[in-house]
């Protein structure tokens, strides 16, 4: 392995590094290198908080253009860099499972991360994925993650591992815990959570469960009790867990799908006192229509700090926490994130089933006709318009949308732009 050699280069370079020639590191941007270009990973690039590589460097299911990513990275100074290890080593999550590549070569591909650190002096926030049960390159990926143990001890570097889709008896949780650095369930929300750690560390968060029994439930794709997943997500975000009595900056409400009416009563009780991020864990990759009926009918959706129901429990917990924390005090940003979250809910309930019932994959352009079913919800007096719809991986599982908030004075055209 060449992991230690790269660390030696880093430590030597620290003595030569200059923060930013001709400028201040404190004024430099935050860079973000997503795992791939699926919506949960790419979305932060559209939020106005970070600088990302050119979208063309990501090529859907073909994987990223690694030369373009390395060139972009080494050419761009930053105060911080939140980065996926798997995209630089393998080209993305899908490629990490099956790409034929020796561990030594993968480690060399990660070298530009330390080169960036030496050249610009910014902080590194890195995450790697412990592969799921059906990955053919499991041993290689684990060897790479193990070789990175020394990186976790470097100054200005935070490193964590997230495990991907752990079904019952999956070895991933045990493998992750054997690493010397933090680990937890999740994957596609990890970039968002580390952005919260990088941009708003120390956020005070109170966690409220729909019912106490939910804490001990082993949720799908996690392989451990939900309370441990919640703890892991908070630690990834460097959030400070507090009680309601201690005055949290944000309340993370964990909904398990048992009683939407009672959960709504909880929300009504908490909302006047605290910003509230709602993680709907009732189903995997879909939200609870019963709860959404209450949220829309009582106008509560627009009052949330964040909402997430698009993925696995860890996906939804991390996404709700990150967006709720990153957009505290930003009314427009908060509403836009809620509009995007509503689209993800709608896609799970309406869009994905409709497309799957009518079109084979790879999806033809005609599948964009699903946009005609858009329901035009309202948020705080704004109508949510669907301005664009595409399928970055040419499959029905995920869709990338452009949504806009239209004030009542501009209600008019409902034309979908491709």
Image (cartoon, rainbow, N blue to C red):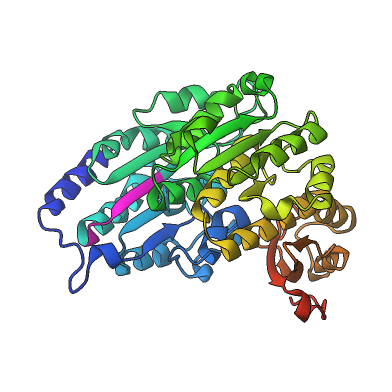
* Residue 77 figure quarter: bottom left
| Residue 256 on image: x %, y % | 72, 31
Whether residue 144 appears in this view of the structure is yes
Residue 39, above or below 204:
below
Q: Nearer the viewer, residue 210 or 392?
A: 210
Residue 98, above or below 177:
below
| Residue 275 on image: x %, y % | 58, 47
| Residue 13 on image: x %, y % | 14, 53
* Residue 375 figure quarter: bottom right
Q: Is residue 241 magenta?
A: no
Specify whether 56 is left or right of 401: left
From which residue to which does the magenta span run? 120-126
| Residue 183 on image: x %, y % | 44, 32
Whether residue 188 appears in this view of the structure is no
Q: Nearer the viewer, residue 418 or 145?
A: 418
Residue 316, above or below 384:
above
Q: Which residue appears at 60% of the width and 60% of the height?
A: 60
Specify whether 136 is left or right of 127: right
Q: Which residue appears at 57% of the width and 39% of the height?
A: 251
């Amino acid at each position: 392995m060449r992991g230690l050699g790269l660390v030696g280069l880093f430590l030597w370079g620290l003595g030569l590094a200059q923060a930013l020639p001709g400028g201040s590191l404190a004024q430099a941007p935050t860079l973000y290198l997503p795992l791939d270009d699926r919506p949960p990973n790419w979305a932060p690039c559209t939020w106005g908080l970070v600088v990302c590589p050119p979208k063309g460097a990501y090529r859907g299911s073909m994987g990223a253009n690694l030369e373009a990513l390395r060139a972009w990275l080494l050419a761009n100074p930053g105060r911080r860099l939140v980065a996926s290890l798997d995209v630089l080593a393998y080209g993305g999550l899908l490629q990490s499972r099956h790409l034929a590549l020796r561990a030594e070569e993968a480690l060399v591909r990660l070298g530009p991360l330390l080169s960036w650190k030496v050249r610009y002096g910014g902080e590194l926030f890195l995450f790697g994925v412990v592969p799921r049960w059906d990955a053919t390159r499991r041993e290689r990926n684990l060897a790479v993650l193990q070789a990175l143990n020394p990186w976790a001890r470097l100054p200005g570097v935070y490193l964590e591992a997230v495990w991907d889709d752990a079904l019952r008896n999956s070895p991933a949780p045990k493998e992750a815990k054997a690493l010397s650095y933090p680990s937890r369930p999740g994957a596609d929300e990890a970039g968002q959570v580390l952005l919260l750690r990088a941009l708003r560390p120390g956020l005070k968060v109170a966690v409220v469960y729909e019912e106490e029994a939910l804490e001990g439930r082993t949720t799908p794709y996690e392989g451990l009790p939900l309370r441990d997943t919640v703890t892991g997500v908070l630690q990834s975000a460097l959030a400070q867990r507090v009680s309601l009595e201690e005055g949290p900056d944000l309340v993370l409400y964990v909904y398990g799908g048992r009683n939407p009416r009672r959960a709504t009563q909880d929300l009504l009780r908490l909302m006047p006192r605290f910003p509230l991020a709602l993680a709907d864990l009732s189903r995997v990759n879909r939200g609870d229509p019963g709860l959404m009926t209450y949220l829309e009918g009582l106008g509560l959706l627009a009052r949330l700090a964040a909402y997430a129901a698009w993925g696995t429990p860890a996906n939804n917990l991390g996404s709700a926490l990150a967006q709720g924390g990153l957009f505290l005090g930003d009314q427009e940003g908060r509403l836009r994130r809620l509009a995007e979250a509503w689209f993800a809910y709608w896609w799970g309930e309406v869009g994905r089933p409709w497309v799957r019932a009518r079109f084979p994959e790879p999806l033809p352009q005609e599948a964009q006709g699903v946009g005609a079913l858009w329901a035009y919800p309202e948020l705080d007096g704004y109508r949510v318009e669907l301005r664009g719809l595409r399928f970055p991986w040419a499959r029905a599982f995920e869709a990338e949308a452009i949504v806009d908030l239209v004030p009542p004075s501009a209600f008019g055209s409902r034309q979908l732009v491709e």
